[in-house]
Image: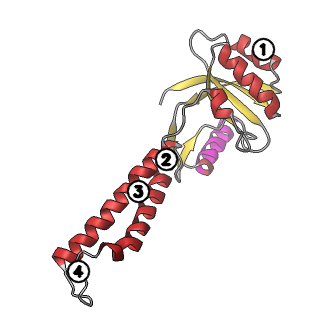
Amino acid sequence: MAKKKFVVGCFDNEEVLFPAVKKVRTAGYKIRDVYTPFPVHGLDHALGLRETSLHTAGFIYGITGTATALGGISWILTYDWPLNIGGKPHFALPAWIPITFELTVLFAAVGMVYTFCYLCQLAPFVKKHHFHPRATDDLFVMVIECTDKTNVEDLKGFLSSNGAIEVNEQIAEEGWWWGRYDKDDEKTLEKEIVAA
């Protein structure tokens, strides 16, 4: 995967983070992401992110569950294995409502979980670069993607003047990759021991 250069600024307070995000965007820099220890209301709007379409996916999964339930039950009870249950008609739609509801909820819930995990690249043995070890602990970490035209030293000074308590430059792989942190840490430690 391609490696990219990032400038990482750490903030210790969300009141300092919000104005810094606005100033960085106004200055024309591309904010890759902001990692926070807890959900920050309004940060998605400050970053200029569009609203998620996860609810649309949930609706589609729910309709798929409804169609699956109605199609399956009607095919089984009217064509494949019709039963005479107390003289009721074979196509007894009111009796199918509980199963239809349950399959609608099941398809919507499971589908939205898988979609969320795919979009956020969450899965066992999927690794992403961690820009700061305290990013989800007690620091607000802003990651800015550098281009060929970005003056890194000016950007570092800009972040420091806007309240960043720590600023550094990192080179990281874009996206995610398969692996385990504990195994990769062992390999890195072995290489360092051999090099020493």
Q: CA distance from mark 3 to mark 2?
A: 10 Å
User: Is disc 3 in contact with disc 1, using a CB cutoff of under 8 Å?
Assistant: no
Report, in whole angstroms, how far the alpha carbon at label 4 lies from the one at label 3: 27 Å
User: Residue 168 falls in which quadrant of the image?
Assistant: top right
Image vertical order of residue 91 relative to residue 184, above or below? below
Disc 2 from disc 1: Cα separation: 41 Å
Q: Amino acid at mark 3?
A: Gly
**Mark 3 to mark 1: distance in Å?**
50 Å
Amino acid found under the numbered disc labelled 2 = His
Q: Nearer the viewer, residue 7 or 139?
A: 139
Mark nearest the camera among 4 and 3 is 4
Q: Quick check: is 43 in the magenta stretch? A: no
Q: Is residue 189 magenta?
A: yes
* In the depicted structure, whether residue 181 falls above or below residue 23: below
What is the distance, in whole Å, between disc 4 and disc 2 at their CAs? Answer: 37 Å
Residue topped by disc 3: 62
Please say if the residues under marks 4 and 2 sit with CB atoms less than 8 Å apart.
no
Q: Earlier in the sequence, mark 2 or mark 1?
A: 2
Q: Main secondary structure of the magenta part?
A: helix
- For the point 65% across and 39% down, the residue is 194
Q: Earlier in the sequence, mark 4 or mark 3?
A: 3
The first of marks 3 and 1 along the sequence is 3
The amino acid marked with disc number 1 is Gly
Question: Which image quarter holds the C terminus?
Answer: top right
Residue at image mark 2: 55
For marks 4 and 2, the one nearer the N-term is 2
Name the residue nearer the viewer: 107 or 27. Answer: 107
